[in-house]
Image: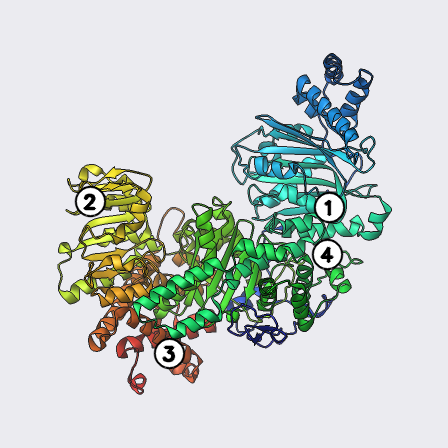
Amino acid sequence: MSSPAPSTPLGDESISITPGTPEGSVNGHSLPGRLNPKLYANGEGPTSGVGTPIGFQRFPHNKLLDHVIGQTQRHPSPQPTHLGIPGGGQHRILSEEDPGYVAAKFEGKQKQMEQVMDQLEEKGFFPSDFVISETTWFYNMLGIDDTYFQTETVDAIVTQILSLYAAKVAAYARDDKKLEIRLDKEAEDHAVYIDTSKPGVSTIEGPRYEQRIDEKYINGSTHNNSYRVETFRSPTTLPGDSEQQLRCYFVYKCQFANPNPDPNETNIDIIGEKRFLQKATANTKAIYQELITNAVGRSGPVIEMYEIEGSREKRLVIAYRQGSAMGLFSALSDLYHYYRLTSSRKYLENFSNGISVISLYLRPLKTPEITAKYPPIEAAIHQIMKEVSLLYCIPQNRFQGHFASGRLSLQETIYAHCAWVFVQQFLNRLGSEYTSLVALLDSNNSVHAELLSKIKKRLRTETFTSDYIFEIINNYPGLIHKLYLDFANTHYVRSSGPAEDDFLPTLSYLRLQVDEVLEGPKLKELISSTAVNEHDEMVMTAFRVFNSSILKTNFFTPTKVALSFRLNPSFLPEHEYPQHLYGMFLVISSEFRGFHLRFRDIARGGIRIVKSRNKEAYGINARSLFDENYNLANTQQRKNKDIPEGGAKGVILLDVNHQDKARVAFEKYIDSILDLLLPPVSPGIKDPIVDLHGHDEILFMGPDENTAELVDWATEHARKRGAPWWKSFFTGKSPKLGGIPHDTYGMTTLSVRQYVLGIYRKLKIDPSTIRKLQTGGPDGDLGSNEILLSNEKNVAIVDGSGVIVDPQGLDHAELVRLAKKRVTISEFDLSKLSPEGYRVLVDENNVKLPSGEVVHNGMIFRNTYHLRKDQTFDMFVPCGGRPESIDLSTVSKLIEGGKSVIPYMVEGANLFITQDSKLRLEKAGTILYKDASANKGGVTSSSLEVLASLSFDDKEFVEHMCVREDGTVPEFYQAYVKEVQETIKSNATLEFEAIWREHEQSGILRSVLSDRLSNAITKLDEELQKAELWENMELRRSVLQDALPNLLLKQIGLDTILQRVPDNYLRAIFGSYLASRFVYQYGSNPGQFSFFDL
């Protein structure tokens, strides 16, 4: 099948929308058109909604995919989510006589009833004639099982019967005669909630007991502190109210048979809760056993449905990992209520291996108006099963109110939630006024530059806040519906297979057929005529930009753990983002939001997780999420000048309420991106998707802040998902998986260190005389290795725990001890400080320094120490710290009388100093080498790790690159690591010398030269990859012979490497090697014939 043409460019404009502009316009420019999608595979079977089918396009030149797809022994890869397939499974049809749970008979129930009645008569709160009837009604008519009566005291039951009676009396006194019974009792190890409930309708007002149970007992569950929930609906309506029934909730603290099993244990008799094991029938245990076994091997939910024999009732069972879906229990009620189903019973069970199981007994309402208006349960249940996976991604979305009320569907509200996240990032742009201001002011003037910086921050903070955007969107459910149809009309695929009933199209498909899908002009006109003001129109029009930018998404994939969107980034305004992105992924879940950005098709960079101390910090991080990600990827692009991969970066921002969910967020982020990289191979689990990008994509990732421990999981998960490039997917993995850890071998620091040593060499300085300041301490990769390699006098070190200073020099042996142990300066032996030395930790206040100064707040002191002038430093090496720790508003503190107070700086930490600040420091006399030049050792190491992964086949890779379980290191691995280290030092020295030479010749600032060299190499690289030089086989082989590591050539051979490594990757090696060597030798502006002298 031929691939679609490249997608239509989206234009480079921001999404500040001017009302009244021509159709489909944004900032006066036209919105992108969409390609006509094409059908995946052979195109047979039913089609999608209007003009929407397709799947991935495969390209024959992709050697890795061709090799794997053709293997006969390849099986469908294990998926993160399992969706039950109708007609399969040994427990599919359940006996009507099997209730699922059978409570142990309470032998003392009759005696307890008599004691309750005696007490009620004694209290005399209601007529004695009612004592028997009220007690009998409570015991026998509410569906409460014997476990409750066995657990509760007589006094508690009496109180609850009196409360229910009082509610009836209160209802009689009301004008509307509405009966509202609300009762709750919370003890240390159990709780009871009773509420009036209309079947099939979500209660938006009132006590919202299910949400309370979620928040208080379920969301925070751990294997040693968890609860089980039972809930029953009374079989009959309330006396005097034919519409309402009573819903009872019982919460019990879990008492596990074995509270600390192996996390992979699945035997239900070992991991089960004692009450559950006592009450569950054999068939229920068998069902749960099957689901738990599947759930342990996956990161997402396992969803199964069972018919009840002789009944229209369905039993829906969902198993998932504890804590991976906050608020799911209550959200499920909104889901089945949307289809006007009700539950007779619900159970939530926790197991000591960390798995939760929810079991719902769903039945249809029998009223004629409901039957006429809503789909039958036989149709609705399959839609619910699909939507449980969507609900799992975001159980409580920001527009849940419209879903609970039935105004919008789950798909529409979650779509609106995703668009809300998108709009927050890209509507807060600066607009034409800022562009005009930039043109008027001189950005080279530091005063003007500082003013622009402040205006930019203020504009972004004060325009559209997330709450303001939410309020606007929330006012337009009708527009959300129409914009969702526009989105679904492109990306929904109606699939066929065993997961679909042959006779029944999905409800999603039927909605597209029934509702009118508006074309661009009509949709624009609807937004303009509906929005009440300019701001509202801007926000709702931004939804169209979101829709137009989506090239592919897993939104309609039957199973998923987070929502991912591959976006065309060309809608970004060029004046704000002058370097064009190649690819953009947006990933959204309840625990996080995140981006993955790359500047080339073949690109690599780390994935970092950003945490926030409080709500205010989260707001700041959320506003700057995309910009920080873009800047990090751009720095990576400049840093990757010596290697075939372009720059990329991924940033995951944890939600303010999920700061402890780093691992959950990372796993969901990776898995949902894989959904868009891998072809679907399991019908009903991973179905074809619409792919408007039309090209295979491979991402190369690595560790960064808060993700180093998660890389092995990502590698193994990619292998389980069937990714043919799993070996090269992540760098930084453990040596047992063939990784070369940067910290163990000091890869990043080796490059930084070459720049430090280069300065000493050029200026003939004895390092032992240098007084050094370092941010990033002995607990980090860069910081620890800088300590181990250094021979200067370390006067001050700042790390996450605080600041330690000694004007006489910190004890080197003690620093080495901390660095090898990888701990913070909080563990420094203070007896080894001189009388002038001191330490201030972040949680300390009112600390008196040897000088007599009192530090009132340790946190503020730590954050600003690098800006103090009371201590003299010769060299500053930032090895850690947040981006923009030195910016235009603070850099003046490092300049006195027009001269910099620190003569030498090598920026090891990414983006620690803003570019404008670097220029001011250099003008003030600092010899400064920026991050994009200095901090590139890690990327070189990772690139050579990737190359080895692509060059070896699986068997050879394990033999030569994987450290054995007993710790034995392959001989090739040891030699390869040494070659990598020498390559890092060589590349760093080449660039250092090139920048030093050009600065000496031209006087141009080193920070400017660094960027010029990077841009020159990048530009020449791209031109060389497109040039006919690649077609010259003799030249190609000659260049690759020089560019590839000698050990790989010796072990595998050039011909084999050419067969195994993808062509686009080989082209990238060819271009980057030639370009970097040429620019380092001839500079960023060589003569026009210089290339032919190379």
N-term-proximal mark, 3 vs 1 = 1
Residue 293 versus residue 275 in the image, above or below? below
Q: Residues within 10 Å of mark 3 (few under 14, many from 20)?
A: some
What is the CA distance from the residue labelled 1 to the residue labelled 4? Answer: 27 Å
What is the CA distance from the residue labelled 2 to the residue labelled 3? Answer: 47 Å
Identify the secondary structure beneath mark 4.
loop
Q: In the rendered structure, which amino acid carries the disc numbered 3? A: Leu
Residue at image location 68% in from the left, 50% down from the top: 403
Where does label 2 land, which residue? 813
What is the CA distance from the residue labelled 4 to the residue labelled 2? Answer: 67 Å
N-term-proximal mark, 1 vs 2 = 1
| Image disc number at residue 498 | 4
N-term-proximal mark, 1 vs 4 = 1
Q: Are marks 2 and 3 in contact (CB under 8 Å)?
A: no
Q: In the rendered structure, which amino acid carries the disc numbered 2? A: Ala
Where does label 1 land, which residue? 337
N-term-proximal mark, 4 vs 2 = 4
Q: In the rendered structure, which amino acid carries the disc numbered 1? A: His
Q: In the rendered structure, which amino acid carries the disc numbered 4? A: Pro
What is the CA distance from the residue labelled 3 to the residue labelled 4? Answer: 52 Å
Identify the secondary structure beneath mark 3.
helix
| Image disc number at residue 1020 | 3
For the N terminus, which image quadrant?
Answer: bottom right
Residue 575 versus residue 785 in the image, above or below? below
Q: Is residue 837 left or right of residue 133?
A: left
